[in-house]
Amino acid sequence: MMDITEVGPRRVILNFIDRNREFAESQDENVANNDQNESLHELRAELVRSVLEKNGKFLKTLTKELDCGSVPNSKKLLHMNRILTDHFFGDMIFHGKRYPSRQEKQQLAVRILEEFPHLKNTRVSENAPAESYFFWIHGGLVTGCHTGLIETRVANMRKDVPPEDRKFRRGKKKHIVVTDDHINIAAHISALSPTPTNAKAIADGMAQVHDLYESMLQKKAESKFHNIIKTLPHFLSYEGEMILQAYNRLNEEPADGPSLNTVLRMGLLCDKTSSSEVEDDVIRGALRLLKVLSNKGVKRSSSLQNATLGELAAEPLIRWITFTETQPGFDELAAEPLIRWITFTETQPGFDELLAVKQSQTVSGEPHMICVAERFKKGNHYFVIDRTVVPCGNSSVRAVEIFFKSFRVFGVKVPVLLRKLDSIIATNVWRTANSSKYKAVTDLTQRFEEFLNNPET
């Protein structure tokens, strides 16, 4: 059979294929829409009031308050919402194996107000929709989580769905078996002095007891950080090297993004003047990123006295301190967590005395970095977590890396004011996250990628 090469017949055949493809796609959409319309029709078919009347415990609230035009208290409104949400969405979630769409949740909220118009007085704010107390798409924003009683109840119902039926499943927790050998090795390496000679033996031992470390990391105890440090004190040794090695074992896939140094220095392009007095360009770039990714609406308080505006802006990330000649050196302060290896004489002031002098400048508040130098100058870096000081050396890039990786290693929550900076590092440098939930981070990441992918333009 000869091939069709003439334009006329070929165009007719292609048009016929396109028409049939469109028809098939429209049929698929109609089937999907019919399934959803059936559920919406069921929602419209039964009155909200008739559902509430069937619940004996709510009948008094229905007749004495709702029918009389008054707005019940929040506890009773929660009860009403629970009855209606369980009735209309319970079977769908637990047996139909699907979650209600936002249109269905919105419709239920509107139906509640149609039945009881005076409940419009529960609206969240003057500019909010009348049904916003029960359901509000994106909470009134362009994107983000929905809000309202219905959304909260549906989210709680999803928790009761068996794991195998859930639409989104969490990863299974790693099963770890801790043996006596792990405990013995941990005891052995903790007794070793953190000297260059013992560095390899300690590093090898930390790798061998990784399962013991992970078992402590999985626990939800408030003292988790101190339990880890007490069992494996060399996390505080070798200027954070053991922290970096533990992080690499937790994240087996190596990062393939740009270097941390590159991303932090790109922060210099975000602003021309802020933190200009900071001598270290890496820290200056990190502070400018922190400014660009500012947290609107987050209240800030400072423990610094007589601080400049530059110090207050940098405080969530880093603080500068100096010691007078009459005060002990910072190494003494940093050595306190390693007291088993260093002995103070009776004439030297202890950690508590030094802490009392420098508490407002060093170890108070949220986790942060410390630079021992004159204000805004370069110096040795440390970081503080839960009143524990960890030395990081004089490299600012390495100090920032150790600081942010320590949150994952010790299972400590990232401070609110540092979460966006942590997110931009995780998504761009370490690639432990594919995307960020923060729009400011996503926008800045796109700008970074555009610059890195076109270095010559």
Image: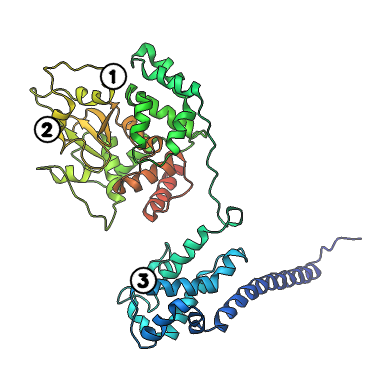
Mark nearest the camera among 3 and 2 is: 3
**Left-right relation of 306 to 290:** left
Residue wearing tag 2: 357
Three-letter amino acid code of the residue under disc 2: Val
Instruction: Say which residue label 1 marks.
Output: 340
User: Gap in Å between the C-alphas at discs 2 and 1?
Assistant: 24 Å
Q: Residue at x 42, y 72 (%)?
A: 79
In this view, the residue farthest toward the top is: 197
The kind of residue on which mark 1 rests is Arg
SS assignment at label 1: loop
The spot of residue 258 in percent (x, y) is 43, 37
Q: Position of residue 107 (x, y in %)?
A: 49, 77
- Please tell me whether residue 119 is drawn above or below residue 208 in the rendered image: below
Which residue is disc 3 drawn over? 75
Q: What's the distance in space between the residues labelled 1 and 3, CA to CA?
A: 55 Å
In front: label 2 or label 1: 1
Image vertical order of residue 161 relative to residue 189, above or below: below
Does dot 3 land on a helix, a strand or a loop? helix
Tally the numbered discs.
3
Q: Tell me the amino acid under the disc marked 3.
A: Lys
Label 2 SS: helix
